[in-house]
Amino acid sequence: MNSFTTIWKAEMVNYAGFNVYRHTKDPSERKRRTALLCVFAFLFIVGIGYIAGASFALEEFKIGRAIPMLYPALAMAVTFMLGVLKARGNLYRVRDRELLSSLPVRSMPVAAARLMKMYVDGLIVTVLVLVPSFLVYGIAEHAGARFWLMLVPEILVLPILPMALAAWVGIVFAALISRVKHKVLAEVLLAVAVVVGLLTLSFTVTGGSTVNMNLTEIVQDQNGNKLSQKEMNDRVAKQAAEALEKIEAKTPFVKTWGSWFSGEKPAGLLILAAVSVAFLLFTACVIGRNLFAISGRLAPVTEHRDYKMSELRSHSVLEALVRKEAGRYFSSGLYVSNTIIGPVLGLVLAVLMGVFGPEELLRKIGNMPIQMHPVAALPFLISVPFCMMSITSASISAEGKNWWITKSLPIEAGDILNAKLLFNLLVFAPFYLVAELVLLFMVRVSVMQRLWLLIVPLVYIVFAVVFGLFLNLRFPKFKWENEAEIVKQSAAVGLSILSVFIAIIPTAGLLLLPERFANIVSAAVVAVVAALAVLLYHKIMNTDLLRIGD
């Protein structure tokens, strides 16, 4: 237990950069990290507000009983998704394998400590999701003392099972990747397959449990008379209750699941806790027995080959720098898998839109009981996945200890930065082009809407790429032991999620606004986003690279 405690403290000592913030003597560094902490606190508060607002909406529609069913499942799903993407990097770190294997410690405490770090990640997600939603539920539904007493145990228990399942996905990933030659390609394909598979499963489960009701049916009666606010709320509540009943009928376990967290059947929570802890211990044992062996197989191997002189070729400065970026990017499966999922999801979404059509797909997913305009919002909806994570948000940090070499090259700083931007655009370009071909040929829209389908995603892709590099220049991280630290846990990557909100907000607005405003709103948003991209690009080009990392 002493070795486990020591290793776990070492894993957690600089969680989210807290130890650096605590001990840094540089006033500018402390100021920068304080500002960053305020931004993350703001995003956390925004997340809590969103969860609480959605819970209030469920209570307003008189289906608050769905909260104990929906939000624990949501917390587990998010924990599992994040765990899958981070499992291999967190569990099987190659960089510190030799150091740990040389120490007088067994691999079991090391595995347990790394699992506990994954548990902390899941615990943060669970607190963000369950605390605001369950507070709304408990107050609105006048929940008893048993519900409030079980709240803390529920939060502590809920992340265990999805975290352990994600660890098993990491085990399978690592075992498969260690046995193939092209490890990066295998890791990328496996990660994409898991994410797309989970989304397909979610679509299959929720499909068909929908209601259809347009805005006219809500605000008017059969004679065309305007209804009162209470009558409109009652109609919406009735339709929402019918949709919930369909979901419960289609998946009977959902209702039982909700009773575990509402306080009605605490025995179910005890069973879940027992199963989760037992499964976690079993997972820790399996990982501990094979930790160093699998980590060794995942380590890169240098093969010495006979060098043969061939024709020498010269490239322009920009082309050479782009090739350098490509070599670094494609050498890291974690880097590729995390940045390529967004474009892949954008392409999948475009195919779904082309096959089913925006209106039909909205009904299959589960449309709200109000009239929506998915065709008007389609260009912005397609842009959302491309903004999830840009390659540039970690391209400066990926230089690591070699950053001084890049800075000392006898070339213009603008060439270095332009190469990083260009490489990101080249990687995203095939996904954008194929998605556009699918949409333009398979979705029936007007000429003006086709124009927006071309322009809006392109503008957002450029903005996301420029915004990612701007953030990484402001918040670089050159001291890292594991690639997961810069790809998943760095400040630049965390803040780049703001570009997703810039795409989601107009998507939600155009879904609800009358179609006659679509062109005006689209033109205004595109102009603002393009102006922001140009402004950020000028700031990037004026950056003094010699000061970055000093």
Image (cartoon, rainbow, N blue to C red):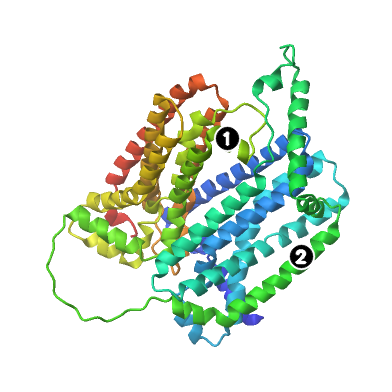
Residue at image position (41%, 50%) is: 390
Q: Point out the image quarter for the C terminus.
A: bottom left
Q: Residues within 10 Å of mark 2 (few under 14, many from 20)?
A: some
Q: Position of residue 250 (x, y in %)?
A: 74, 47
User: Viewer-nearest of labels 1 and 2?
Assistant: 1
Labels in figure, total? 2
| Residue type (three-letter) at the residue carrying disc 1 | Glu
Q: Nearer the viewer, residue 146 or 238?
A: 238
Q: Where is residue 535 in the image (x, y as percent from the top left)?
A: 34, 37
Q: Position of residue 433 (x, y in %)?
A: 36, 43
Image vertical order of residue 517 relative to residue 139, above or below: above
What is the CA distance from the residue labelled 1 to the residue labelled 2?
40 Å
Image quarter for residue 509? top right
Residue 24 visible in image: no
Residue pointed to by mark 1? 360
Image vertical order of residue 501 relative to residue 295, above or below: above
Residue at image position (62%, 36%) is: 363
Residue 476 visible in image: yes
Say which element carries label 1: helix
Image vertical order of residue 376 relative to residue 98, above or below: above
Q: Which of 537 and 277 is in front in this view?
A: 277
Which is more N-terminal, label 2 or label 1?
A: 2
Residue at image position (64%, 38%) is: 366
Residue pointed to by mark 2? 273
| Residue type (three-letter) at the residue carrying disc 2 | Ala
